[in-house]
Amino acid sequence: MLNIWTNLPLPDPALSRLRAGVSPHHLLISTQMSNILRAAKSDPLLADADIAFGQPDPDQLLSLTRLKWVHLSTAGYTRYDRPDLRHAVARRSILITNSSSVFDEPCAEHALAFMLASARDLPAAFANQLGPHDWPQENIRENSHLLTGQSALLLGFGAIAHRLVELLHPFRMNIRAVRRTPRHDESIPVHPITDVDNLLPAADHVVNILPAHPSTNGFMNARRFALMKPGSVFHNIGRGSTVDQQSLIESLTSKHLAAAYLDVTDPEPLPPGHALWTTPNCFMTPHTAGGHADEFDSTVDHFLENLKRFQSSTPLINQIFK
């Protein structure tokens, strides 16, 4: 019998799904719920757990001796990507998995939607519908483009980028990517991230999928925005901290960039008076790229599949810190 702890704020149907799926094991439900925007607090109940599902307090993980496996309910794991925690889980052979398989499809579709909205000048048409009710047919047609034949540079090449490449395949785009360490078995040309400055000037679309990390803070800065092709478009579905937002604002205001499509900002939620809200040709969604109507059920199902694998000593899906 295993003690399975969670602090994931599940709606009742998903919680019932979890209860049924973990039976006959014990489900320990924390009274201190957490999510990607709200850091977890230490929970005494976690000390009795063999498995943690959700967003446990990373500091508390350092001292737990019973814990065998942590399954994070998010794709991102910045809070846990620390040398002291990596050392602790390696020393005690604690398995760490995330939920990237739950969010790669919606995030990739969101990025594709951004790119298509930009290519077809949808924001201008929607703004007209909400505003003057003119018929700006000529302007919108002149500002519409085909993705076919355009180029894209993906910053990062994990599960989301891999799926995005599949979705973009019918458009016959010229796609390249950068990542920290290319594996040389990728489906597109992938370069070391140190080559990014040489690749930015050729891209019509730059899609940022970088995670938050000390090494990526402010990665897209004034110098790199200046390197981007005049009239190109910047998309961010990674993390807001990877972008120097003031430099992005200046690049848009000067019309060096044609547009920016952002699903993430720094901070989040973005304050109502922040300059990004009114920056010309800056279009935002409120960190919804990974969202979908059944995401809680999908998250629970992903955990339950890994629970079966854990019990049968089969390799887990989305294992990190290997």
Image (cartoon, grey):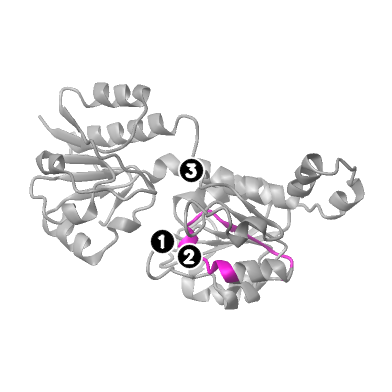
Amino acid type, mark 3 = Gly
Amino acid type, mark 2 = Thr
Residue drawn at point x = 71 percent, y = 68 percent: 253
Residue 212's label in the rendered image is 1
Residue drawn at point x = 17 percent, y = 56 percent: 89
Residue drawn at point x = 74 percent, y = 52 percent: 119
Q: What element carries label 1?
A: loop
Residue, disc 3: 290
Magenta-colored span: 230-246
Q: Which of marks 1 and 2 is nearer the N terminus?
A: 1
> Mark 1 packing: few (<14 Cα in 10 Å), some, or many (20+)?
many
Q: Earlier in the sequence, mark 3 or mark 2?
A: 2
Residue, disc 2: 242
Q: Where is residue 70 in the image (x, y as percent from the top left)?
A: 23, 45
> Mark 3 packing: few (<14 Cα in 10 Å), some, or many (20+)?
many
Q: Are marks 1 and 2 in contact (CB under 8 Å)?
A: yes
Asked whether the viewer can see residue 120, the reply is: no
Q: Position of residue 289 (x, y in %)?
A: 52, 45
Is residue 32 inside the magenta stretch?
no
Alpha carbon separation for disc pair 3 and 1 = 16 Å
**Vertical placement of residue 226 versus 180, above or below:** below
Is 185 left, or right, of 145 in this rendering? left
Q: Earlier in the sequence, mark 3 or mark 1?
A: 1
Is residue 239 inside the magenta stretch?
yes
Amino acid type, mark 1 = Ala
Is 49 left, or right, of 308 in this rendering? left
